[in-house]
Amino acid sequence: MLGGLFSFHSTWKDRRDTYMHKPLPLECISLHFREFQFAQAMLFAIEEINNSTDLLPGISLGYKIYDICGSIARGVRVTLALANGNEMEFEPSEAPCTRSAQVQVIMGETSSSPSMAIATVIGPFYIPMISHFATCACLSDKTRYPSFLRTIPSDYYQSRALAQLVKHFGWTWVGAIRTNDDYGNNGMAIFIETAQQLGICLEYSVAVFRTDPPDKIRKIIDIIKASTSKVIVAFLSHLDMDMVIHELSHHNLTGYQWVGSESWIVDSQTAAMDKHHILDGAIGLSIPKAHVSGMREFMLDVKPLNSSSQELFTEFWETLFSCKFKMSNLSVGNERECTGHEDVTEMQTSFTDMSLMPIFYNVYKGVYAVAHALHNILSCNKTCDNNVQLDPFLILQHTKKIQFKTKEGDEVYFDEHGDAAAKYEIINWQPTENGIVDFVTIGLHDASLPEDKQLNLQNKTLIWAQNSKQVPVSVCSEKCPPGTRKVLQKGKPVCCYDCLRCAEGEISNSTDSITCVKCHPEFWSNERRDACVKKEAEFLSYEEIMGALLTAASLFGTCMTSVVAFIFFRYRQTPVVRANNSELSFLLLFSLSLCFLCSLTFIGRPSEWSCMLRHTAFGITFVLCISCVLGKTIVVLMAFRATLPGSNVMKWFGPAQQKLSVVGFTLIQVIICILWLTISPPFPFKNFKESKDKIILECALGSAIGFWAVLGYIGLLAMLCFVLAFLARKLPDNFNEAKFITFSMLIFCAVWITFIPAYVSSPGKFSVAVEIFAILASSFGLLICIFIPKCYIILLKPEKNTKKNMMGKGAAKSS
């Protein structure tokens, strides 16, 4: 025999009263058709098994049906009685068994909270309990509920599937409402945990129960009104959902996208109650559709019930047809009399609604699971071994291990947690023209597949809230476009953020980037800050205006020097040229030409040879130039000192000594340059720090000591030359060489003293331009101050170009 616990009486008169705030009554006051259907499904499976010759041949399954009327206390009392071998006489009670027997299996319960209480009581007895609709993930804990099994998937999978569904449509800012019991609280807890992992934030999460006082309900309504999220995830039982819809209808809260759990998403009675179309476009998960041949006909054919239980048949018939039998003590004179021959199929009630056929199928599979376990225990083939002593623990162990296919071809088994395979259909509420909601399957979710393949949506047209064809948007903050990064808003969830533009030199090339990435030093961010573009290389080139002008000035100086040299060569026998030491003059002009030309090495893209050449050539040519000027200054001083009586100075500084002094002074600079190039030569360098969006191509000094040694030596010779020229400033007016040298050295020193701060402070290519300008300015200063006055006399005042005029009063003959 098979004992059973199954509730099919309702605590309320009908579903229209579910939103009335009343405490749960302790007694059953009306028949609940849904629970009656579940009982019918169990009876159908038992009758089918008893009539089978393949499964449990010669064995008949018995049952007893009890109604706990939604009361956990009532369920625990029945369970304890059955576990102890006693029979409780609650109304109504069905006992088709011919003899009493200890209960072996309990079928039920529908809800999670009563199932938890019952499973806790029978756990120590190891009596199997198989539920068809209790989905709380907590019931998978085999340490607390060792004998609990179920043919419906755990909410652990449903909650995760709902979170994946929400993520799929891009909703990251949602509200949540749940039933305040084990089903709703545990299911929502798993949903929230998964949602956080997927980057979904909850604006609010509230709990309701059908017996909550009006004040609490109003507070929840106010929370929904004040929210900015447009998606509501409802983990509610169908009774609580009815209450919520009723309350929302009073406040006309439409336009929200509802995401529902399997408890109400395919409930046609919930859809019928939604007169204000609050749930239009809702999506959610449901147990896959099922069809069991013969079950619908069996469930609608309740007349055989009259032969086995007059009391149950009478109550059911009177409730279904709103009539009274004459023998009923509750008959009232003005009520319609029942004939017992009314047509059930013509009624449009929750009893004739077969939308919960998947749940009925779960009942069917649970009964068959027990039958297959008994079949194995009794070693049934053509006959069964009736001598086997049945034990609940033995039945539990075999039931956990069963694996079979139903006559419809569906495989049935339990995993290590006693749960069924987690497969769901994704349902979309699509209202039709006649006002009836069509539950359209738009996809599937299979938890046994890899996570990225579990959700499979079909290419179907979806209807959203307010009959919209566009997917609703529900985000706290719009996506941050490329070129920006997310910055969290203080005190708000991670889904609420501001989008800040990336700083210069940084980019983000993806949507909703949390950081900006710095570009490579050779690259810079574009205007949109979404890509790095190569920086423009900056150097002083011949093509730009400044480079062209400096090149022209350099070439002009070279040409001018060549012209002066030509004039001096043409008039080399004249007193003016001879009086100024023609050999040193030509060497000075040659060095000035090199000074003008060396400035060209500073223009153009820096390379290894140009970097080494520009500073060394500049240093050597300028020392050669200053050495010649210094030699000319010493010659002037010596020439006039030689006029003193008894003076023999000129023999110590003749032409040979003059040439050796120039070579000696220049050789020192050459040695400094060789040491510089050997130890740490200048090299081309990409300067990324000077400019943000450009690469400054310049020549690094290598050894700063070498650079300043070269400049310092030039400065030392220039100062020495200036001092000597200054000492010779009072020589006879007709011989003005010392004055011109003094002026040229003043210009030279002024230029290079000014050059140092200008060079240090000038950015990029302008520092190169400053150096070129200093070279050209000092070169022009020497050329103009020393040679132009003489060219003036040679070309325009030839009458002054005489020996007598050059000698002047008190002057001595120059060597």
Image (cartoon, rainbow, N blue to C red):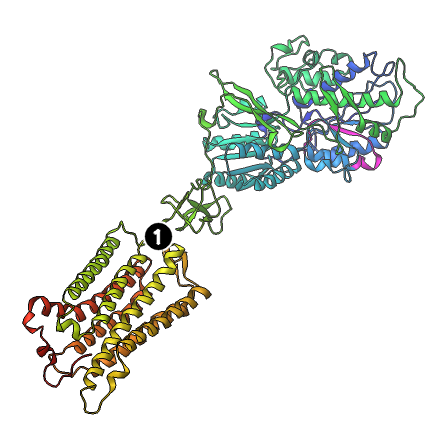
Q: Which residue sits at x=24%, y=87%? A: 648
Q: Quadrant of the C terminus?
A: bottom left
Instruction: Tell whether 502 sits left or right of 273.
Output: left
Q: In the picture, residue 736 is in which quadrant?
A: bottom left
Q: Is residue 92 visible?
A: no
Using the image, determine if residue 797 lies above or below residue 549: below
Q: Quadrant of the N terminus?
A: top right
Residue 361: give x, y in percent of width and height: 70, 20
Element on which disc 1 rests? loop
Q: Which residues are magenta?
A: 121-135
Q: Which residue sits at x=23%, y=78%? A: 633
Q: Is residue 289 visible?
A: yes
Instruction: Tell whether 509 sits left or right of 53.
Output: left
- Does residue 266 show up magenta in the picture? no
Q: In the picture, residue 156 is in which quadrant?
A: top right
Residue 694: give x, y in percent of width and height: 36, 52
Q: Residues within 10 Å of mark 1 (few under 14, many from 20)?
A: some
Residue 715: give x, y in percent of width and height: 31, 74
In the displayed orientation, state which residue is furthest to the bottom. Answer: 646
Instruction: Tell whether 808 sits left or right of 591.
Output: left
Q: The residue under label 1 is which amino acid type?
A: Arg
Residue 667: give x, y in percent of width and height: 36, 71
Q: Which residue is mark 1?
A: 605
Q: As rendered, which of 195 and 720 lies closer to the eye?
A: 720
